[in-house]
Structure formats: C-alpha cells, structure tokens
C-alpha cells in the first residue's frame, strides 16, 4: 500500500473512531452530582451573572451538612460561595450550556429543572464527550504512528481503552479527567512529532504543546506535575532550548488567567480554593488538607 493510500486509510479510521466514541459518550450521560453541579454552578454564574460567585445557584437547607443542597463542593470566602474546582472546564462549557438552555426554554418553558438538566447535558457533550472522543483518536495516532502498531491492533487497543476502562465513566459525566487528559495527550503527541518527525513547523508545534499543557492545568491543577516532564522531553530534541522557551511562553496566558482567578476569588495569586473549602467534607490535619506521606500511615 502506498503512503497516500495508508494516509487515506488512517484518516477513515480516525473519523469512524471519533464518531463511534462521541456518540457512545454522548449517549451514556450520568447526570448531576456534587462535582458536576459545582462546575455547572460556575458556568451558570459566568453566563448569567458575569461573576465567579455562585451564590445565585444555592439551594438552602436546614441541615448544616447540606447547607448548599445541590453541591457540597464549594469554597466560602468573604460572605460568598465559589466552586472549589479549577475553573476552565466550566468556562469551556459556556457555549454548550447556553445553546442547551436556549433550546430547553423553547421545548419546556415551564420546567426550570429540566432546562438546567438539558443544558448541563449539552455542556457535558460539547466538552467531556468531545474531549474523550478526540483523545481516543490521538491515542490511535500515537500507537500507529510512533509505536508502529498495525491499524487493526491500534484500533483494538483504543477500543479496549475507551470502553473497558475507567476512562469510559469519566467521559460520560461532567468531570475534568477526560478533558485534562485530552490536553495532556495533545501536548505529548505534538512533542513526539517534534522529536520523531520532520523539523517543519517545530516552533509552532512547541507553542501549541505549551498552550495545550497549560489548558490541562487550568482544567485540573494536578496536571502541573507533568510540566517538568514535557519540558525535559522537549529539551532533549534538536534545538530543544529554543523550543522550550516557546513552550513556556505559550503557557504564560494560562498562568496569568489562573493568577487573576485566584486573586479575585481567594485573595492572592497562589491562594487555593481548598483553603476556604466546605469544612464538612474537607478534613484537615494540623491545619493542612494535604501532607507528606509517611510509612507509619501504612
């Protein structure tokens, strides 16, 4: 088979795989929950109130444990409620939520609860399900292009991963996992193209990889630990030092936004929502939520 035929064949595989996973993840919608609801609260607050404060989404209860009925994953500072999650997934969901809300208001004008649920569904599909399907396509590309697996074996492995692991569950609910994983995988694939492909457009690929990596951090802060791995990998490439500068430069806008968000919501550039989180569900020891692991805990 010629190179052109192989390329066309893989393009068909990519398209069919994307359609399969996107429809699958969109069909198996898990609805709400504390984590999903707090992120949707931020989406609604930005869309309707132009603020990060989610007070308007609060549903009161006499039970102190359920002070904020629709979610317990909140932070409270200076008399206002905020989500205790990273903000970017909620921001990415705004277009889908707005479209879903407009449609549901036409279909069920007298049912606000159904409107929120329908809008949340479309927000989930346009962010989480979409990212999950795209990550599976990237994985197929990685296995075939860089690991040298045949198209059939690559497809089989991706189908197992996408339907038979925890990734399936995380791609059907409004969680951050599949979205942050997609951006991490996108950054990795771009960096692998720099290292193992031709040198064309390497600066652009490095910058796009940095932007993708920073988006992953904005969606889920713990992916920050992957940044040194990306930079070390890129530094080992030809012209790695220059490309690393471009990678880091592309991270700056995301870092500035996170600093702004932390400052506005929690009072400082490095302030954390967990410092103001719901004390009923966040258990602190010696004044800290997280600590160093020790062998005596085993």
Image: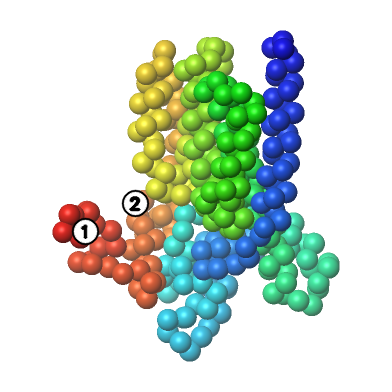
Quadrant of image for the C terminus: bottom left
Quadrant of image for the N terminus: top right
Classify mark 2: helix, strand or loop.
Answer: loop
Q: Residue at x 54, y 12 (%)?
A: 198
Query: In the current view of this chain or complex, which residue is farthest to the left?
Result: 296
Q: Residues within 10 Å of mark 1 (few under 14, many from 20)?
A: few
Calculate the distance from the C-alpha at mark 2 to the C-alpha at mark 1: 32 Å
Front in this rendered view, residue 269 or 92? 92
Q: Earlier in the sequence, mark 2 or mark 1?
A: 2
43 with respect to 214 (left or right)? right
Q: Which mark is residue 169?
A: none
Q: Residues within 10 Å of mark 2 (few under 14, many from 20)?
A: few
Q: Which mark is residue 298?
A: 1
In percent of width and height, residue 214 lies at 47, 39
55 with respect to 159 (left or right)? left
Classify mark 1: helix, strand or loop.
Answer: loop
User: According to the image, label 2 marks what residue?
Assistant: 270
Q: Is residue 261 visible?
A: yes
Rendered position, 288 above or below 292: below
């Amino acid at each position: 088979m010629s190179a052109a035929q192989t390329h066309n064949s893989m393009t068909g595989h990519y398209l069919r795989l994307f359609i399969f996973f996107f429809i699958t993840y969109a069909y198996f919608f898990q609805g709400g929950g504390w984590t999903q609801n707090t992120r949707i609260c931020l989406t609604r607050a930005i869309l309707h109130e132009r603020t990060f404060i989610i007070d308007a989404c609060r549903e009161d209860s006499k039970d102190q444990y359920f002070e904020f009925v629709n979610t317990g994953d909140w932070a409270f500072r200076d008399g206002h409620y905020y989500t205790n999650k990273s903000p970017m997934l909620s921001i990415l969901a705004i277009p889908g939520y707005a479209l879903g809300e407009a449609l549901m208001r036409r279909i069920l004008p007298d049912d606000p609860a159904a409107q929120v649920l329908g809008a949340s569904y479309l927000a989930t599909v346009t962010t989480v399900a979409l990212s999950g399907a795209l990550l599976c396509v990237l994985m197929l590309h990685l296995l075939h292009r860089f690991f040298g697996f045949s198209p059939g074996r690559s497809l089989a492995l991706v189908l197992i991963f996408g339907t038979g692991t925890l990734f399936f569950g995380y791609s059907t609910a409004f969680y951050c996992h599949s979205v942050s994983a997609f951006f991490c995988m996108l950054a990795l694939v771009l960096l692998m193209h720099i290292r193992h492909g031709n040198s064309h457009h390497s600066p652009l690929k490095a910058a796009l990889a940095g932007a993708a990596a920073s988006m992953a951090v904005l969606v889920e802060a713990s992916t920050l630990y992957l940044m040194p791995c990306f930079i070390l990998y890129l530094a080992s490439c030809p012209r790695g030092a220059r490309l690393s500068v471009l990678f880091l430069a592309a991270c700056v806008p995301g870092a500035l936004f996170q600093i702004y968000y932390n400052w506005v919501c929690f009072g400082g550039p490095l302030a954390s929502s967990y410092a103001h989180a719901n004390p009923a569900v966040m258990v602190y020891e010696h004044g800290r939520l997280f600590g160093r692991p020790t062998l005596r805990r085993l």
